[in-house]
Image (spheres, helix red, strand yellow):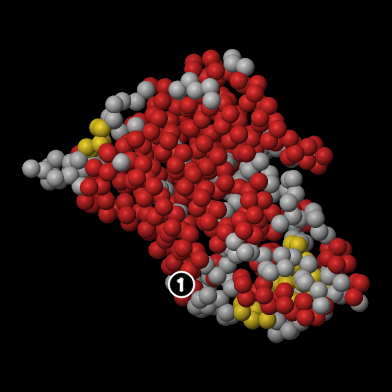
Amino acid sequence: MRFTSLNVELIRARPRLVIWVVLLVQAAIWLVLPLLIYGSPPADVATALAIGREYRLGTPDGPPLAFWLADIAFRAAGNHIAGVYLLAQICFLLTFWWLYQLGRAIVGGPHAVLAVLLTVTVTTFSSPGVAFGPDILARPLWALLLLQTWRLIGQGRRQAWVMLAVAAGLLVLTTSAAPALLAFVAAVILAMPGGRRRLASVDLLYALLIVAVIVLPYGLWLLRNGAPALALPALNRFDAKGLLALWLLGGLLFSMTGVIVLTMMTSRRLNRFGEKPPVIARAGVDPVGRRFVMIFALVPALIGCVVAGLYGWDNVVGGAGIALLPAGLAVIVLSGDLIALRQYRLLRKVWALAVIAPAVLAAAIVFVQPWIRDEASATTLPATAIARFFGENYERRTGKPLQAVAGDPQLAALVAIGRSRPHLLLDDEPARTPWLTPSDLIERGGVVLWRATDALGTPPAAIARRFPGLVAEVPRGFDRLVNGRQPPLRIGWAIIRPKASQ
C-alpha cells in the first residue's frame, strides 16, 4: 500500500486551508522579523509617512492613497512603525488570496494552490514587501483587477463590473503607472471575444462613473497643479538603454530563481529512483483562460522592462510585484493537467528553503554585513533614539514641540516620524515637499540635521547656503544596532528658533 503525504492530500481536499496556513506563516515572518531586527524603517517608508502626514490630494511622488494609508496605519498603532509593517502584510495576504481566487477560476483549487506556493518563493514578495509604499499597495489592487477582469470576460459575470471599477479607481489613486496598466487591461478585453461583448453593455457606463467618482478629487488636483507630462524618450544611446532593459529583465528572472529551481526539480530527468510520485490533477484549462494568463504573465514584464530602459528608469514600469504576480500561475498553466510532484520530500525542503532564505539574508545584512563591509544597512540606524533626542532637545530649548525638520533626507525623515510628527522639508528637493519652504522653517523654527565630518560639526556648504546663520551644536553620536567596522553615527545639528520666541 502506497502512502501519500498529508500535505498533498490537504492540497487536494482542503486547498483553502493550505493557502491560509502558508500565507499567514509568511506574513507572520515578515511582520515579526522587521520588528526584531530593524532599528529604522527600510527604503523610503519614513519619507512616505512624512508625505502622508500632510494629507495632500496629490504629491510630486505620485497619487496619495498609499501615503494616506501609511499614516493612518502608523497613527492607529500609536505612532509605531508596527502599524505600517502590518499594513504591508495585509497587502500581501490580499494579493495572494485574490491570486488564488483567479487561479481557482482558471485551473481549479489544487493547481491554484501550487501556483501560489510557487509565487511566494519570488523574492520580490519577501523582504522588499516590508517597505510599504505605492508599489506594495498596487499589488493587491492589480490582483483584484485581474480577478474581476477574468470574471467579466471568462465567466460572464455582470457583477464583476463594480469591483473592477473600484479596483481601477483605487489603482489610479495609488500608482502613476495606473493609466498604462489600465490601458493594457482594456486592450486585452477588446482583444477577447467575450470582452468585446461585455464592452457593448450599458454596465460599462456605470463602471466608468464609479471610476470617475473615485478619482475626481485627485483629477481636480492634477488639473489645478498640472498633470506630469511624459515626453518621448530620446532617440539615442540605444546600446545603454538596451543593456538597462536587459538588466531589469535579468533582475526579474533572478528573483524567480525559486520558481525555476522548483519547476526543474519536477522534471522526469531528475526522477532518479523511478518512484511513483504524488499527482495533482485538474479537469483542464479553457484556451481563453490559458491565453489570459500568459498575456498577463509575459507582456507587462517585457514591455515594462523595455519602457523603463528607454527612459532610463531603475525599476520596471508598475513595479516588479505587478510584473511577476502571474508568473507562478503561468508555470502551472503550462505544466499540463497532471502535475507529478517528483522527489516530493526534497521538493518540500527546497520550497521551505526558498521561503526562509530571504529572511535569513535580511538578518545577515543587519548583523553580518557591518563586519565585512565598510557600510551598514540603513535599517540599522536607531530611528527611535534619533527622533527622541532631537525632538526633546528642541522642546527643552524653545518650550514648543518640534514642528519642522530639514537637512539630510534620511535623518530628517526619521525625526519626522517622532513623537511630535514634525513637518519634513527636503531642502535639496523642495518640489517634493511643497507644504514647507526654507523660509517657512526659519519663520516657524525647527531642526536642521547633517552627517558630521569633523569634531565641530560644521554644516555642509549646501545646507549652510540654504539656511544662512546656522549655529552648529556639538555633534551627537549614536550607536547603530550593529556598528561593526564603522564608527558610531555622528550627526551634526542646529536649532532654528521660532521668530516669535526670539
Asked whether 100 or 176 is in front, the reply is: 100
Could you say where residue 432 lies in the image, as x and y percent from the top left?
74, 53
Asked whether 193 or 420 is in front, the reply is: 420
Q: Is residue 499 above or below residue 221?
A: below
Q: In this view, does 31 lie above or below 451?
A: above
Could you say where residue 376 lies in the image, as x and y percent from the top left?
53, 70
Q: Total marks drawn?
A: 1
Residue located 57% across and 43% down the image: 138
Screen quadrant of the N terminus: top left
Secondary element under disc 1, as helix, strand or loop, is: helix
Q: Is residue 44 above or below residue 415?
A: above
Per the image, the residue denoted by label 1 is 367
**In terms of image quadrants, where is residue 212?**
top right
Tell which residue pokes out farthest to the left in this image: 1
State left or right for residue 262 relative to residue 67. left
Asked whether 243 or 376 is in front, the reply is: 376
Asked whether 381 or 197 is in front, the reply is: 197
State left or right for residue 441 relative to residue 179. right
**In terms of image quadrants, where is residue 83?**
bottom right
Residue located 78% across and 66% down the image: 404
Mark 1: amino acid:
Phe
Residue located 67% across and 65% down the image: 417
Viewer can see residue 136: yes
Residue located 38% across and 59% down the image: 357
